[in-house]
Amino acid sequence: MAGATGQLGLLIAHHLRRRGAAVRALVRPEAQAGAEAESLRRQGVEVEVVDYAYQTSLTQACTGASCVVSALSGLREVIVGAQTQLLQAAVKAGVPRFIPSDFCIAYDRLPEGSNRNLDLRREFSRRLDRAPIQATSVLNGMFTDLLKGTAPVVLPGPGLVLHWGSAEQPLDFTTMVDTADYTAAAALDDAAPRYLRIAGDVQSPRGLQAAAEAAFGREFRRLRPGGLGAFNVLIRLTQTLSPAPDEVFPAWQGMQYLRDMFSGQAKLAPLDNDRYPDIRWTSVQQLLTRR
């Protein structure tokens, strides 16, 4: 596992261990003494320090693995650069399978250049598809967890559900825990296809309003500031005024993600939720209730 000390990576490693898998976590030197690495060790994960710049040691670290799972997070240096190093090491080590750090909406359905972070995943996916290794990407829509703070959609304070475009557009949500559990199952599934698409819950803005009202026990109103054209103008303005090119998730990047969801272009279909029937999906209402 790469990126195992990150929030999603820790969860994937946990669920792999819960499913009985032997896990080797590849961690950078600066992370080996951290609380996350210690948590992995306590769960029985083998922690191996690697430097992605040294292909030989990275290849040795991948040797004997049945699947390499990447939960790396970052910009081009990481998503394209470090993952390419990891991919080359996996191929040289004879690893049969690779799961990249996608975990997003249907980037393969979006126009090139419309979403910076998803363009990076598309760029790496082209390299992955050319490599002599079986690949599986897990696409999960938006992490439902973001509705409780980061994503400005469900706003409990003023009792609002903010959306752009149609109030009937279906949106895909999956909690980080459910995504990790599903990814662990996919990593142990030698017959997993190139893409697995999941959504723990599918709700339109109108459905989010009903879920919020049920979770909080009070009335919520929908607020539609404008259509998608107006949202695009706001995104460009935000990118001009606050470019933050070195940030992984600047404000305009999150807005691009929401725009692509509200447009319907990145809707996941068909869904593969039933592939691993032991997983019990968490709904938006259930997540909002946990406060």
Image: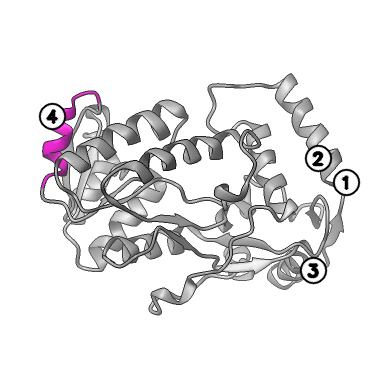
- Counting residues from the start of the chain, the first of labels 2 and 1 encountered is 1
Element under disc 2: helix
Q: Quadrant of the C terminus?
A: bottom right
Would you say residue 213 sits in the magenta stretch? no
Residue 218 - label:
3
Residue sitting at x 82%, y 45%:
228
- Name the quadrant containing residue 268: bottom right
Dot 4: what SS?
Answer: helix
For the residue labelled by badge 3, is the local secondary structure a helix, a strand or a loop? loop
Which numbered disc, 2 or 1, marks the residue closer to the eye? Answer: 2
Left or right: where 71 falls relative to 171: left
For the residue marked with disc 3, what is the amino acid?
Arg
Q: Name the residue under label 2.
A: 231
Report how far apart the C-alphas of labels 4 and 1 lie in the structure. Answer: 54 Å
- Point out the tag, 4 or 1, that comes first from the N-terminus: 4
Magenta span of residues: 53-63
Q: Where is residue 89 in the image (x, y as percent from the top left)?
A: 20, 37
- Going from N to C along the chain, the mark reached first, 3 or 4, is 4
For disc 1, the marked residue is: 225
What's the residue type where badge 2 is placed? Phe
Say which label, 2 or 4, has the lower sequence index. Answer: 4
Count neighbours of disc 3 (C-alpha within 10 A) and say few if under 14, some if 14 to 19, many if 20 or more.
few
C-alpha separation, residue under disc 2 versus residue under disc 1: 8 Å
